[in-house]
Image (cartoon, rainbow, N blue to C red):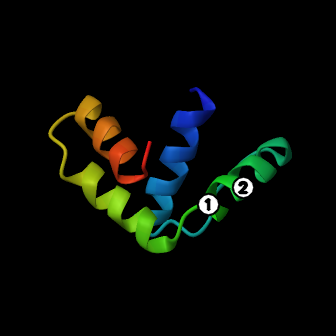
Amino acid sequence: MPWESGQRFVRVLVGLGVTSLSMTSRALGRVAAALALVTEDDCRRAARAALGAATADEARAVVAEALGG
């Protein structure tokens, strides 16, 4: 998975209420940096958008839009 998609996925997980993520130590800095750029409200908005999508492609598109990219 390209990192751009991965950081959106992490933000959606946080928006869904996930409080613990498992990752390699190499990924920790990138994940922390990605989360530092958004608020919890941003994450929740992205998660709601994903849940309202009819397809995976639509979910990716609405999440990207919700997160400004």
Tell me which corner region of the image, top left, top right, bottom left or bottom right, holds residue 36. bottom right
Tell me which corner region of the image, top left, top right, bottom left or bottom right, holds residue 61. top left
Q: Residue at x 62, y 65 (%)?
A: 20
Q: Residue at x 50, y 46 (%)?
A: 8
* Type of amino acid under label 1: Leu
Left or right placement of residue 11 versus residue 60 in this view: right
Left or right placement of residue 14 versus residue 59 in this view: right
Per the model, the C-alpha gap separating discs 2 and 1 is 7 Å
Estimate the x, y position of residue 34 in percent, counting from the top left: 64, 53
Disc number at residue 33?
A: 2
In the rendered image, is residue 9 in sight? yes
Whether residue 48 is situated above or below residue 24 in the rendered picture? below
Packing grade of label 1 (10 A; few <14, some 14-19, many >=20) is few
Q: Are marks 2 and 1 in contact (CB under 8 Å)?
A: yes
* Type of amino acid under label 2: Ala
Left or right placement of residue 7 versus residue 22 in this view: left
Q: Residue at x 69, y 51 (%)?
A: 31
Q: Residue at x 50, y 63 (%)?
A: 14
Estimate the x, y position of residue 46 in percent, counting from the top left: 36, 56
Packing grade of label 2 (10 A; few <14, some 14-19, many >=20) is few
The C terminus, quarter of image: top left
The N terminus, quarter of image: top right
In the rendered image, is residue 22 in sight? no
Query: Dot 1 lies on which element?
Result: loop
Which residue is tagged 1? 37
Q: Which residue lies most toward the right here?
A: 25
Estimate the x, y position of residue 28 in percent, counting from the top left: 78, 52
